[in-house]
Amino acid sequence: SYVWLNGAIVPATEAKISAFDRGFLFADGIYEVVPIYSGQPFLFDAHMERLERSLREVEIPQPVSRAHWLEIIAQLHAHAPLEHAVLYIHITRGAEFPRNHLPSPNLQPTVMATLSAFTPPVGSIAPARATLMEDIRWLRCDIKSISLLGNIMAKMAAQQDGSIEPLLHRAGRVTEGASSNYFIVKDDVLITAPADTLILPGITRDWVLKLAKKNGISVEERPFSVAELYAADECFLTSSTREIVPIGTVSGQLINDGQCGPITEKLMTCFRNSRP
Ligand code: PDD
């Protein structure tokens, strides 16, 4: 497989990054994940806006323009044609020696991108399990940071509990998953946590909110509690690579009857019809 690294496409086995890269030393960088269906990046501008915002928030200069990203995708496709793909973008502040928390000015960011095979979800309504756990991450989860240790620890704990995803909360307030956003439905109202600094503003989350509004479903972006989650009629999660996944059980407790609810199923159909 191939990697686009700092301006050139190289075989993955030959891609080299400095041992003093601040991404390696400090996780000083940001990333983005864009699904590509049949060669078409889905919600590309929204992903680019989020990428550019993450860079601004951490004061890393934007090294690649949107138009250039489209060229890079085409180049990667030319090297390894894939029907559907996931574009992974990874940008760090750059490399410098000696190691110093405070970055020097005018570092050259390290930029890496890969395409990997993507199997779009088939839209199964089989409900999945999630595991409730405390959100121990930092307080700027709105930045798509490559520092993901908290997310990874939660993901491993969820797997050990037989779940597909952790469901994180802070003092009883539901935030998000390790790599997904959560929604609940109560009395025909779709509810999801607000896009503040405690969650990543998911591109799929935003798209699902738009689809819901277009289809006459009432939506509320507001904090909701673990108690509301357990009393909900429906629950699902969203992400770029998983689209919409119905959640039937949280830490062994059924949500309603534990089946995929009608609003979830409707949104899954709307989603499938709205993407390439
Ligand atoms: N993760 N919350 C977190 C913490 C995430 O890492 C992600 C995405 C989401 C969902 O965002 P989106 O709908 O834009 O994919 C929410 C990506 C897919 C990943 O880390 O691979």
Image (cartoon, helix red, strand yellow):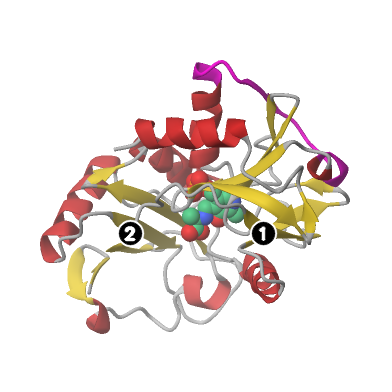
Inspect this view and state whether residue 54 appears: no
Tell me the residue at 49%/70% (across/down).
Answer: 23
Determine if the magenta segment contains residue 43.
no
Residue 257's disc number: none
Q: Amino acid at mark 1?
A: Arg
Write down the residue under mark 1.
129
Q: In the picture shown, does residue 142 fall above or below 75?
A: above
Q: CA distance from mark 2 to mark 1?
A: 23 Å
The location of residue 269, given as percent across then percent down, is: 44, 34
Q: If you read the primary sequence from the N terminus, does the residue marked by circle 2 or circle 1 appear first?
A: 2
The picture quadrant where one finds residue 42 is: top left
Q: Are marks 2 and 1 in contact (CB under 8 Å)?
A: no
Give whichever of 74, 127 is nearer the camera: 127
Instruction: Read off the magenta span.
Output: 213-228
Tell me the residue at 51%/82% (across/down).
Answer: 98
Q: Amino acid at mark 2?
A: Phe
Q: In the picture shown, does residue 38 fall above or below 77?
A: above
The location of residue 191, given as percent across then percent down, is: 70, 31
Give whichever of 113, 274 is nearer the camera: 274
